[in-house]
Image (spheres, helix red, strand yellow):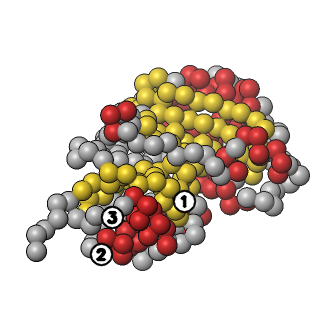
């Protein structure tokens, strides 16, 4: 009997992070990574370890997470997708599977990551989709929020928006895009960067909320960037409104894009849930 050669596979993953202690495997607490590795190991009939594009925090969701792993088990893409999903809880799903080149790495090959933060801006708390939104009852000016955030574009030292527990070797990141849009009572903040610091998106959103409700001027965000002091910025926005929605890779890898099929992420459909 000959040993089969190992292959490297990439997977697109979506999950509701409400009941997980983040992406990363940890002892005695539920994690997305542990659930995926258990399901993959059952289908592969061998131990599987996975690597992700971005390690989301406790309570954070994803529609466009990308992972990779190596295995000696040879299955069709459909067999991997259906087989793994059959062993996963309903809060986690594999969206696509494909073989990739040996030099592909879900984290280190990525060129950009895009997060979306969803705010329900209404005086009453949401009844539908409550675990996937952050409720903010004070009126918010999205135009002010977007204008204030434009100073963050480009390569900067994001110390003011970095959690004190962040272990990254450098606070420098390159922010590609920051968009704030409203659809009825729903506000969507899209932020794209080459990479993110620990709590960076939530800290940026928390500070933009201060501008949006009128507590701080638009120029305050630029001031925060300049002073490089986390204690002077806004509070960290809640985790449950945050989604990792896409990861970019060089075209030579040929990875598919994960569609934003969830109604909560669709601008046109959001309006149907207004109170």
Can you say whether 212 is above or below 53 in the image? above
* Residue 162 x %, y %: 47, 42
Image quadrant of residue 172? top left
Q: Quadrant of the N terminus?
A: bottom left
Image quadrant of residue 91? bottom right
The label on residue 45 is 2
The label on residue 241 is none
Q: Nearer the viewer, residue 83 or 37?
A: 83
Which numbered disc, 1 or 3, marks the residue closer to the eye? 3
Can you say whether 36 is above or below 208 in the image? below
Q: Residue at x 63, y 30 (%)?
A: 179
The label on residue 15 is 1
Q: Residues within 10 Å of mark 1 (few under 14, many from 20)?
A: many
Q: Secondary structure at mark 1?
A: strand
Q: Residues within 10 Å of mark 2 (few under 14, many from 20)?
A: few
Earlier in the chain: of badge 2 and badge 1, it is 1
Q: CA distance from mark 2 to mark 1?
A: 24 Å
Which numbered disc, 3 or 2, marks the residue closer to the eye? 3
The label on residue 75 is 3
């Amino acid at each position: 009997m000959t040993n089969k050669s190992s292959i490297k596979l990439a997977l697109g993953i979506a999950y509701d992070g409400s009941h997980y202690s983040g992406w990363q495997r940890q002892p005695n607490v539920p994690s997305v990574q542990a659930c995926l590795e258990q399901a993959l190991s059952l289908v592969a009939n061998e131990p599987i370890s996975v690597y992700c594009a971005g390690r989301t925090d406790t309570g954070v969701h994803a529609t466009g997470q990308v992972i990779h792993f190596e295995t000696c088990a040879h299955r069709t893409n459909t067999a991997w997708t259906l087989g793994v999903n059959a062993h996963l809880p309903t809060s986690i799903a594999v969206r696509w599977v494909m073989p990739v080149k040996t030099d592909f790495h879900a984290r280190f090959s990525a060129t950009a990551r895009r997060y979306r933060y969803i705010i329900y801006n209404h005086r009453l708390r949401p009844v539908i989709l409550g675990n996937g939104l952050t409720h903010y009852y004070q009126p918010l000016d999205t135009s002010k929020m977007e204008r204030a955030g434009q100073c963050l574009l480009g390569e900067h030292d994001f110390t003011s928006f970095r959690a004190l527990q962040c272990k990254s070797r450098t606070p420098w990141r390159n922010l590609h895009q920051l968009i704030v849009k409203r659809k009825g009572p729903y506000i969507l903040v899209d932020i794209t960067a080459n990479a993110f610091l620990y709590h960076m998106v939530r800290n940026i959103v928390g500070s933009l909320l201060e501008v949006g409700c009128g507590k701080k001027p638009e120029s305050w965000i630029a001031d925060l960037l300049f002073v490089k002091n986390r204690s002077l910025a806004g509070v960290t926005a809640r985790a449950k409104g945050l989604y990792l929605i896409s990861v970019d890779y060089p075209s030579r890898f040929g990875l598919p894009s994960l569609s934003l099929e969830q109604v909560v992420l669709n601008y046109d459909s959001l309006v149907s849930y207004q109170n």
